[in-house]
Image (tube, rainbow, N blue to C red):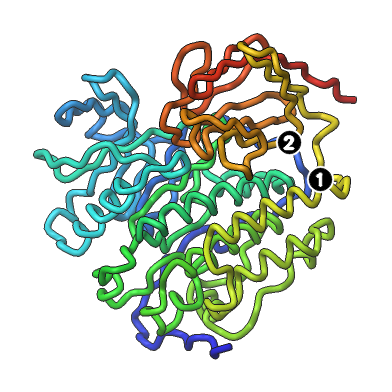
Amino acid sequence: MSPPPKPPSPPDAKPDNSPEEAPSPLAHITPEIIAERPTLTSLAAGDSGFSGPKTGSAFAGLVLDDFELLEEVGRGGMGAVFKARQKSLNRIVAIKTLLAHHFTHSAILQRFLGEARAAAGLSHPNIVKIYQVGECPVGHYFVMEYIEGRSLKDIIQERTAPISWTVALMSVVAEAIHHAHKQGVVHRDLKPSNIMIDRFRRPVVMDFGLAKFVDMPSTITQLGVIVGTPAYMSPEQAGEEIHEVGPSSDIYSLGAILYTLLTGRPPFNEKTSLATVMKVASAEMPPRPAEFRKDIPASLEQICMKCLNKDPADRFGSAKALADELSQFRKDAKHKGSSMSLRKTLPSVLLIAEKTGKRVRLFNETNVIGRASECDIVIRASDISKRHCQIILESDRVLIEDLNSVNGTLLNRERIQLAELLNGDQLTIGEHAFHVRMKKRKTS
């Protein structure tokens, strides 16, 4: 195992002083986590997360090409984010604009446009969608998916996340990051404020402002500053081994987010940003999560701590490997009859094939449907994608999510990406139609 990187030597290096370094203490309660209000936190790294009331702006009501700005929903050091309406398609979108005093700053402009370019090349249901990049009299902007929901940072600061929810969430996020890595994109600033939970409880990875293309040199790191957020950056980002920053750096950050979800605090929680950077870059490992929360299973703690190893070679080999390990943990917990299991409170869901009358009962919290043998429900047909869609059982509702299938998933003859499934619905997967029968269980 190679020694950990040394702390950075430039005395003027200024790490991002994010408020996430010292989150509020959390009471250990596990109520359901529900997206309650529309927000969007897609400020670039280095921007302060928007947590106060929505502000007015001189730009509100302005028309940018095909877009009418409705209200400002976020602002930071580099840009502002607006809720807007695209007139031609009559849909709500989010527009990120570059602040006026940055118009002539080539490095910041490059970073701003790089965020759009990195995310635009990714097509995944758990990564924010970029629709358009433009320039107008008020400056540069890009248009993206508007996420109606809450940031993971807000949720963590309010309550302790249930272990089962945490594992399911991080498995999905790790899959999304694996998709980015396959396309050659390293996020480099994964943290709770850059993950939104929408109104369907879908996690969405935001803010690719510090993203790096694996096979291209990074202009941001050439600026002589520490890249990332101290509490969630990897040791190689915090130290002098910047050339080693790659997919494994994102895996460290995923582990730091998992740690925060489990314990209510990041792995290193020092009083200042510089002190946090020094801890991250040192050989010292963070305290075990079980020191802060006694109900954390040992196997889950091992997964978390493996992500946080100082040497990138000692972490998971890929974000996919991490996602698989978390999925396996969930399966093992259910087989052992763990208290994590929600079987007694989950709705009873039955799919009845329209043509054959065959009945399929759903047993898992997440039920993946496709033609691949590892799926929970296998439909061997050419019109079915390997991982076509998934049905998610929650205590108070059931969701159906298309997994970027070729032939789509239809609910009551309308193509959907993510929707709530109700008793009596008709679900069509490829060309295979099913009637949905559902019964919610009584809770004591």
- The residue to which callout 1 is attached is 334
Q: In this view of the protein, which residue sits in the foreground, 374 or 149?
A: 374
Q: Gap in Å between the C-alphas at discs 1 and 2?
A: 9 Å
Query: Does residue 429 sit above or below 320 in this rendering?
Result: above
The residue under the point 63% across, 58% down is 258
Q: Can residue 37 be seen here?
A: no
The residue under the point 47% across, 85% down is 7
Left of 21 or right of it: where is 112? left
- The residue to which callout 2 is attached is 364
The residue under the point 48% across, 12% down is 413
What kind of residue is marked 1? Answer: Lys
Q: In this view of the protein, which residue sits in the foreground, 101 or 190?
A: 190
Check disc 2: other Cα within 10 Å, few if <14, some if 14-19, many if 20+.
Answer: some
Q: Quadrant of the C terminus?
A: top right
Left of 99 or right of it: where is 442? right
Mark 1 lies on a secondary structure that is helix
CB under 8 Å between discs 1 and 2:
yes
The residue under the point 46% across, 50% down is 194
Mark 2 lies on a secondary structure that is loop
Q: Quadrant of the N terminus?
A: bottom right
Query: Does residue 71 sit above or below 295 in this rendering?
Result: above
Residue 304 lies, in percent from the top left, at 66, 64
Residue 434 lies, in percent from the top left, at 61, 16
Q: Which mark is residue 68?
A: none
Q: Quadrant of residue 125?
A: top left
What kind of residue is marked 2? Answer: Asn
